[in-house]
Image (tube, helix red, strand yellow):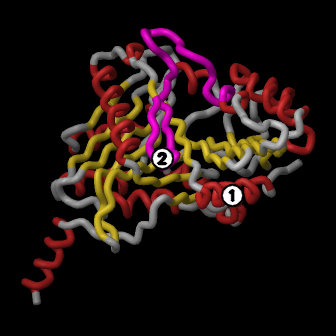
Amino acid sequence: MVYMFVSVAVSLFAQSTSIDLKLPMVIFTDPQQFEEGNSDKVLLEQISKLIEATPSGEEITICVFKFGLQDLADQLVNAQNRGVKVRVILNKGDTSKDANKEIKDYLQAELRDFHYLENNISDKAIIHNKFILFSAVETTAGARHNIILQTSSNFQKKGAKKLQDMLIVSSQDLYYCYLDFWFDIKVLGAIEELEDYNYFNCSDNQQQQAYFFPKRRDKDEFGSDNILKILKDLKDPGQAKIRFAHGKWDENRQELAEELEKLKGKGALVEVVTNSDVDKDVKKELKDLDDGIYYLDPSYNMHTKFFLIEDGSTRQVWTGSHNLTDRSLRENFEVLLKTENQQLYRAYLEYFDQVKQLADN
């Protein structure tokens, strides 16, 4: 009996598990949990399951702004010990120093491919990414490859008390674009020359696109505001339906609010849900949306960064780590991910309507 017990224990340590995973999928934190005074760890639990389901010989690649969860860090070390190639980039800087201190020291000591990097583009610039790449995971239906997990949530307890989303897709083309982005940050960050980063984007044959910020080339700002261009390029603006669920918005992206006002004047349906402490200049501009603006009760904290577009027969979800700030566009390392999957669109729309009901206006 003792022999059997030890044998099983070693087997569990050495092998990955399998999970029920139907892709693409989206997961949201539940506002009802917050109303009852609870946190919602559903996103973090999904990350844990995917790590445990990554078999030996595969890769896990992470880039995240804040990491404060010891259990998750232990899982990454265990994955490395069973033969998974684990890569992690963590932001170095004043805004994340306290959150990252303990995990940084631990992962630096335990992981063979760990990088604690500072964004030197400006004093306040950060590596704000929140994504994980899995080269393959074991599912109950067999191996799934080239998995991208893009979320609005940092890896910390506070994230489980905020309104968050997590989009998980499988795409070989986008997977390798994300991987190229990770290596750009690693290489340039190691020599403290992240200002040399050159913006790029890519797409696949599944109507998915990813945009990798900051929007710079040759050490200078490059091109226009991506989101503003999306709004200006609508094919049928008078019939469009536009919904924003963004918690952070500053006066340097105020032109987005102005464009939304113009679209509403043309007949578009425009709805915005945001935090009640949003920048005062943006709030002043948003007031012209009348009954289309929803400010969340201060007891809630919106950390989502998504917007939805209905334009003719097109249905688009745009999500990622990208706040509506000038730094997100020009200085921070961020991802804006688009999908035109109809099932995902409906799920995001349902969540938007749910969150809208939390508004205190």
* Residue 79 at least partly seen: yes
**Does residue 281 lie above or below 40 as drawn?**
above
Identify the amino acid type marked 2: Gln
Considering depth in this image, is 20 or 120 the residue closer to the camera?
20
Considering depth in this image, is 38 or 185 the residue closer to the camera?
185
Label tally? 2
- In this picture, residue 296 sits left or right of residue 108: right
- In this picture, residue 248 sits left or right of residue 94: right
Disc 1, SS: helix
Residue marked by disc 1: 351
Disc 2, SS: strand
Residue marked by disc 2: 150
Identify the amino acid type marked 1: Tyr
Q: Position of residue 222 (x, y in %)?
A: 53, 14
Considering depth in this image, is 342 or 106 the residue closer to the camera?
342
Q: Badge 1 local density, few (<14 within 10 Å), some, or many (20+)? A: some
Disc 2/disc 1 C-alpha distance (Å): 17 Å
Indicate whether residue 261 is drawn in magenta.
Answer: no
**Does residue 346 lie above or below 121 as drawn?**
below
Q: Position of residue 205 (x, y in %)?
A: 45, 46
**Does residue 139 lie above or below 226 as drawn?**
below
Q: Badge 2 local density, few (<14 within 10 Å), some, or many (20+)? A: many
* Residue 52 at least partly seen: no
Residue at coordinates 55% horizontally, 43% vertically from top-left?
338
Q: Which residues are magenta?
A: 201-229
Q: Position of residue 227 (x, y in %)?
A: 65, 30
Residue 182, image quadrant: top left
Residue 276, image quadrant: top right
Q: Position of residue 262 (x, y in %)?
A: 85, 29
Residue at coordinates 33% horizontally, 68% vertically from top-left?
139
